[in-house]
Image: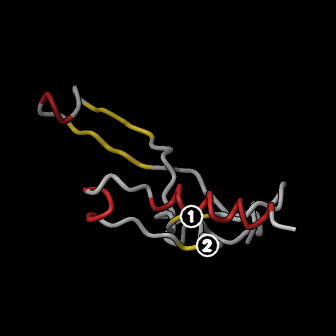
Amino acid sequence: MHWVTCNIPILGEPTYGINGNASFIHLLGGNKKDGVSVVFTGMKVTQHDGSLLRGVGIQPDILVPVSIDTIKQGEDTQLQKAIEYLLLQLEP
């Protein structure tokens, strides 16, 4: 699935399908003061087609994983693959 508005492929690794919208309730001073803290999300997050994002994530069109070895070697495999992709688009 290309990025909807610009027809640009997504390159990289699948996301985890978790949004960052967290709500906190701290009672009786919260857990740091012998009270109770509750964390929850009340937001339903979906993909553009209406399917759930949570637990599924965004799947890339071009899978380019990152490994510990490439990180140690200072290689940015995703950037390299993106440059390769763009250069292919420029060929007649």
Give the Cα separation between the discs numbered 1 and 2.
Answer: 9 Å
Label tally: 2
Quarter of the rendering occupied by the C terminus: bottom right
Mark 1: secondary structure: helix
Q: Is residue 9 left or right of residue 32?
A: right
| Mark 1 touches mark 2? (CB < 8 Å) | yes
Quick check: 76 left or right of 26?
right
Residue 28 location, quadrant: top left
Rendering coords of residue 12 (x, y %): 53, 64
Determine the image quadrant of residue 34.
top left
**Residue, disc 1:** 81
Taking 36 as reference, is 45 left or right? Answer: right
Rendered location of residue 88, percent (x, y): 73, 67
Which residue occupies 27% across, 63% down?
68
Write the residue at 71% across / 61% down: 87
Q: Is residue 74 above or below residue 13?
A: above
- Report the front residue among 72 and 2: 72
Tell me the quadrant of the picture where the N terminus can be found.
bottom right
Name the residue at 23% across, 32% down: 30
Mark toward the viewer: 1 or 2:
1
**Viewer-side residue, 91 vs 47:** 91
Near-viewer residue (29 or 4): 4
Name the kind of residue labelled 1 in the image: Lys
Q: Position of residue 55 (x, y in %)?
A: 49, 70
Which is nearer the eye, 81 or 43?
81
> Going 63% across and 64% down the picture, which residue do you hit?
84
For badge 2, the amino acid type reads: Ile
- The residue beneath circle 2 is 62
In the image, residue 43 lies at what x, y percent?
58, 51
